[in-house]
Image: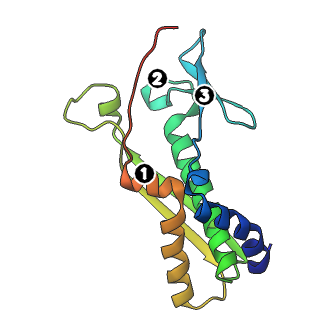
Amino acid sequence: MDAAELRATQAPIKEKYKSDPNAALITLKARGSIDSEGIACKVETGRALAVAGLHPATGGSGLELCSGDMLLEALVACAGVTLKSVATAIEVPLKTGIVTAEGDLDFRGTLGIDKETPVGFAEIRLRFDVDTSAPQDKLDLLLKLTERYCVVYQTIKNGPRVSVAMRRV
């Protein structure tokens, strides 16, 4: 897909959202079920079933997916798609691109060993390694726009309102 095809594909969608802002409000959903045999949760990904479990650093077997890894994988996926889309739109030729996300956790917080240790990632680093002939000013713009339009990155960075509820079924 080139820049013209991307614009042509997105033009009617953008026009619809401009004329009817409510049409742009979509609720994405994820659903999982607690595994009755182990400490795991089966997550419906829309394409396959993923089984998430404890990370080996908290007693897991390593056979299930770690939800922290899944968060970083979602960031890499979103950032990679956004990077490619923006590169196409602003005509930055990418021969190759590698997207890497790393996150630092202190498992003492998760395991309740130290009440002062936060639970969750203390730092996440996202890196793009690209092979391109584009000048540096175009790469700077590519990075700026990728950051701006990556849904997962912006969600992590800005921390949306989150609510939690429990219902008896």
Rounded to the nearest angstrom, the CA distance separating label 2 from label 1 is: 26 Å
Residue 167: % across, % down: 45, 14
Under mark 1, the amino acid is Ile
Q: Which residue is painted at 52% across and 35% down in the image?
A: 67
**Which residue is nearer to you in this view: 131 or 22?**
22
Element class at badge 2: loop
Residue at mark 2: 59
Number of residues whose C-alpha sits closer than 10 Å to that of mark 3, classed few (under 14), some (14–19) or many (20 or more): few
Q: Secondary structure at mark 1?
A: helix
Quadrant holding the N terminus: bottom right
| Badge count | 3
Give the mark nearest the N terminus, 2 or 1.
Answer: 2
Q: What is the three-letter code of the residue carrying label 3?
A: Arg
The residue identified by callout 3 is 31
The amino acid marked with disc number 2 is Gly
In the picture, measured across the screen, residue 71 lies left or right of residue 157, that is right
Residue at the image point whose x is 38% and y is 32% from the top: 163
Residue at 59%, 9% in the rendered image: 36
Circles 1 and 3: CB atoms closer than 8 Å: no
Q: Which quadrant of the figure has residue 30?
A: top right
The residues bearing labels 1 and 3 have C-alpha atoms spaced at a distance of 20 Å
Asked if residue 167 is positioned above or below residue 158 in the image, the reply reads above
Q: Classify mark 3: helix, strand or loop.
A: strand
Q: Is residue 25 left or right of residue 120?
A: right
Residue that sits furthest to the front in the current view: 19
Residue 156 tag number: 1
Q: Is residue 92 above or below residue 39?
A: below
